[in-house]
Amino acid sequence: MKPPHLLLSGIAWLLVPLAVTAVEGQDPQHAVARDFECLAASLRPLVKINFEDLPQQASSCPDVIMPVEPLPNPLEISGVKFTDPGCLATGFCSAPTCSRDEDNPYPGNIVLSLNPGGAIDFPPGTGSAILDLQGIGSNPFTLRATDVLGGTAEASASGELFGVIFVAFTSSVGLSRIEIVEVDGTGGGLALAAVYFGQSLRETPPPDCQENPPENVTHLRPVASGTIRYFPELGVLEAAPLCSEIQSTFFKTTEVNREFRRGFLEFAVPEIDGEIQRATLILGESRGWTAQPLPPDLHEISYYPADLEVTADDFGQSTTPLDVFETDPNLQPAQFSFDVTSLVNEFRGKEIGFRIKLALDPLQDQGCWQGSEFGSLYAVTPSLEITTKQVSFLRGDPSGDAQVDLSDPILILLHLFSSADRGVLQCLKAADVDDSGALDVTDAVNLLSYQFLGGPAPREPFRSCGPDATQDDLSCASGPPCP
C-alpha cells in the first residue's frame, strides 16, 4: 500500500530557494510565496505558539559562560514539544534582523534556537504546521517531516536576510514530527520566531504561491580580524591579546593609563559572477552584560584597501567613513547591518577592510570604560552577504552581438595570444565553448569546427540565452541583449 501523502510548502518573505526531496516513494507537493497569508488562508484555523513568555536569555545548559535563566529540554508549550540534542536556548532578536512581535514591547522578538538533530513533536490529530523562521541570515537549511504512519518528506531552503521565511508541512493522516536535519552557511541553530499548527487533516495541498526565481547569495567571512590597542601616555601601540576578537572600546585605569582599542575585519571579495543586487555587512555584538546603567556609545565604521593581515600599522591608517551607529550596554546585544553594495562592486576581485572605533575619542576626565565587541573569526562572526542576479549569455558568442559567427573564435584566439587584446572579453563564460571551466585554444577550434565542419554545437546555453548551469571561476560581467 502506498504511504499517505505528506505535503510540504516553503514560503519566502522575498525570494527563497526551496527544494523538496521525496523519501521512500512519497509524493510531496510544495508552494513558494511572498507572505504568510498566501499559505495560511487554506490552513486555518491555526494555533500560534510564540516565545514571548519565555526569558529573553535562557538555556537548558547550566554551564554556559553568560548568566542566563534555566530552560527545560524538552520544552512543552500548548501540547507541542521542542527538543534539542545539546542546548535548547532562547535569545532576543532585534529589528531589522527580525520582525517585531506584537507581544514584545521592544523592536524585535524572542526566538527559540534548535540545533541540527533537534525536533518538534506535535499532538495527535495535527494536520498542518508552519514554522516562522527569522534571524538566520541567508543560511541554507534542511527540515524533515514525518507523518503518523512513518512517511517522510524533506525541505531544503535558505533564510531571508532581514526577512521572514515560513516553511509549512501538511498531512492527510496526521503530522507527527519536524526535525532539523542541517543548517549551513555561517552555522548555528535554526531560530524559531513562532510555530503555527492546525488540528484538521489536509487532503489537498496548500496553494501555489510561487513568486520570482531565487537570487544567488554568497556568504563571505573575514579572512583576518583583530583589535589594535594604543596607550598614548605610555607610547605603546600593539595588537591586543584577544586572538581575532573585534573591539571598539576605551579603558582607563589611572590618569596615565588610557587604552584605546580599534577593531578591524578584512575580506577577500571574489570576482563575482553576475549583477550585484545588494551587498550587506553584518555585525553582531558579542559583549557581556552590565551590572549598572551606562550611557550608549557611538561608533564609526570606515573602510580601506586591505592586505588580509591585521597589524599595529592599521591603527592610524587612512580610511574612508562609511557610517556611524550606536550601541547600548543596558540592552540585549544587537545586530547591525550596513549597505556596502557600491563598495563590493568597487572591490570585486580585491581585498577590503573595515575599521570600527569610537566615533569620538573619550576625553581625559571621562569614564573608565566605553564601547562594545563585535565577534571574531570563531564566534558571532561578522559576514558580508552578497546577493547577485546571474547574467544570461549565449555560449559561443564572446563578442556579445547575439549571434555566433567567425568573429567569435577570432576573439577567443586574440584573448589567448595577444596581450593587447587580453581583457576585452566581457563574458568569459561565453568563450568557454566546451564548458570546461577554463579558456584554451580548444574552445576556438571547437567553435570553428561547429561553424565549418559540422562539429558538435557549443554546450548550453547556446540555442537561447541563459545562465551557466555549472560552477566555475570564469566571470561574466555582461552578456548579449538577451530577452
Image: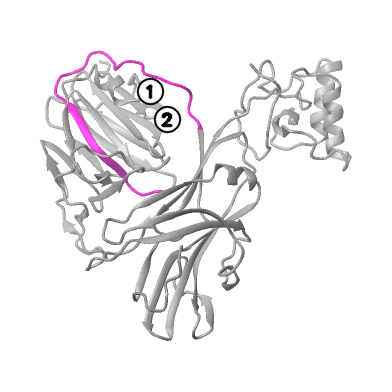
User: Which secondary structure dominates the residues rendered in magenta?
Assistant: loop
Displayed quadrant of residue 328: bottom left
Question: Which SS class for mark 1?
Answer: loop
Q: Camera-side residue: 296 or 381?
A: 296
Residues shaded magenta: 187-215
Q: Position of residue 28 (x, y in %)?
A: 33, 21
Residue ID for mark 2: 16
CB atoms at circles 2 and 1 under 8 Å apart? yes
At x 36%, y 30%, the residue is: 155
Residue 192 on the magenta span = yes
Residue ID for mark 1: 32
Q: Is residue 347 left or right of residue 53?
A: right
Q: Is residue 130 left or right of residue 236?
A: left
Displayed quadrant of residue 179: top left
Q: How many marks?
A: 2
* In the image, residue 102 above or below residue 32: below
Please identify the quadrant where the C terminus is shown: top right
Residue 32 on the magenta span = no
* Residue 475 visible in the current orientation: yes
Please identify the quadrant where the N terminus is shown: top left
At x 68%, y 15%, the residue is: 463
Question: Which SS class for mark 2?
Answer: loop
